[in-house]
Amino acid sequence: MVLDSPGTPLREAELQEPEPGPGQLRLRVEASAVCRTDLHIVDGELPDPKLPLVLGHQIVGVVDEVGEGVEVEPGSRVGVPWLGWTDGDCRFCQSGRENLCDNARFTGYHVDGGYAEAVVADARFCFPVPEGYSSLHAAPLFCAGLIGYRALRLAGDATRLGLYGFGSSAHLIAQVARWQGRRVFAFTREGDTEGQALARSLGAEWAGASGERPPELLDAAIIFAPVGSLVPVALRALEKGGVVVCAGIHMSDIPSFAYELLWEERAVRSVANLTRQDGEELLELAPRVPVETHVEVFALEDATEALDRLRAGRINGSAVLDLTR
């Protein structure tokens, strides 16, 4: 499925078979999860995508060919995340912050992604799929899970954790947080009773609408929804010394707010991308929790429908394209 320009529907296309170069591998895609970042690209909210573009950066498939220097065996099942390449030389890469690489290239944005039957990826940025996960259920781990995990780390040792926007990332990371012994408070769109029920089933002790005050103050809040007006809302719900972590790649403008909301050492920070260390840690942890992914499955040709439903907030858990149909 190809995006020709932002604001246009994806179209089906027959593309030339990609060939792996040195350091690359080729996957036969089995599953590709749909991410809100894909929606931001389609809607023109992220600048300068490769065009035409094959979206998709939560990819699971089977290796069928490798380039020179790749030690991954054909037949291996691997996952491909958002971070597709870094230069390794900039000051960020050299200081363990490859997620901030000056010249990073991202899967399904700068290079073609997984809304296709085959994809080529840099082998250094691919991960083995954890045992016990089907491809459909593993795919959301490779972005929703990874970004959620990095956001959770940046929330520090917060015991009372608020999650604003209970979708693909939040439903995964709520399980990790509960396993770590944290208390989870989930916030959804007004009237999203299905999302609130899912949150409670995954261990949230309270679930309500984003505009509601939780029953007690929070030590940290992670905002997954791309809604800037939630920042002052979350700050009002914070205990002194708490942090609001904005986990999205794009967010609507944050409105001005009184300094008193930030005072008493409250903080607001963002999350950018992921590191390979994040991936290694989460994928080792996921089967131990175990993290269960709740998925709604679509055929590849129904990718536009999946994006439309995500935009409307009508996906419960994660949307995943099934390439084995």
Image (spheres, rainbow, N blue to C red):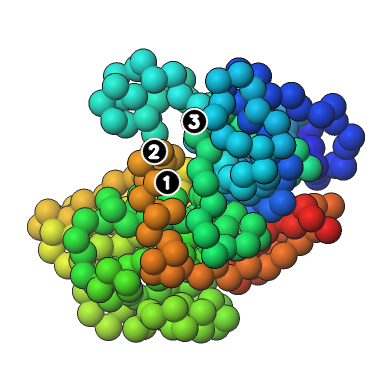
Q: Which of 214 and 276 is in front in this view?
A: 276
| Residue 159 locus on image (x, y percent) | 21, 70
Residue under the point 57% across and 34% down: 72
Is 293 placed left or right of 115 in the picture? Answer: left
Where residue 175 sits, quadrant-wise, is: bottom left
Where residue 63 sits, quadrant-wise, is: top right
Seen in the picture, residue 320 relative to 54 is either above or below; the reply is: below
Q: Are marks 1 and 2 in contact (CB under 8 Å)?
A: yes
| Residue 126 locus on image (x, y percent) | 53, 38
Mark 2 or mark 3: which is in front? Answer: 3
Measured in 3D between alpha carbons, the distance from the residue under mark 1 to the one under mark 2, in whole angstroms, is: 7 Å
Mark 1 or mark 3: which is in front? Answer: 3
Inspect the image, locate mark 2, and give the three-letter code of the amino acid beneath it: Thr
Inspect the image, locate mark 1, and give the three-letter code of the amino acid beneath it: Gly
Q: Can residue 117 be seen in this view?
A: yes
| Residue 274 locus on image (x, y percent) | 41, 41
Q: Mark 2 points at which residue?
A: 275
Q: Residue 279 carries which label?
A: 1
Q: How crowded is mark 3: few (under 14 residues within 10 Å), some or many (20 or more)?
A: some
Measured in 3D between alpha carbons, the distance from the residue under mark 2 to the one under mark 3, in whole angstroms, is: 12 Å
Mark 1 and mark 3 lie on one chain; the one further toward the N terminus is: 3
Q: What element carries label 3?
A: helix
Q: Residue 264 carries which label?
A: none
Seen in the picture, residue 293 relative to 51 is either above or below; the reply is: below
Q: What element carries label 2?
A: loop
Residue under the point 43% across and 61% down: 286
Q: Mark 3 points at which residue?
A: 124
**Quadrant in which the C terminus appears:** bottom right
Inspect the image, locate mark 3, and give the three-letter code of the amino acid beneath it: Arg
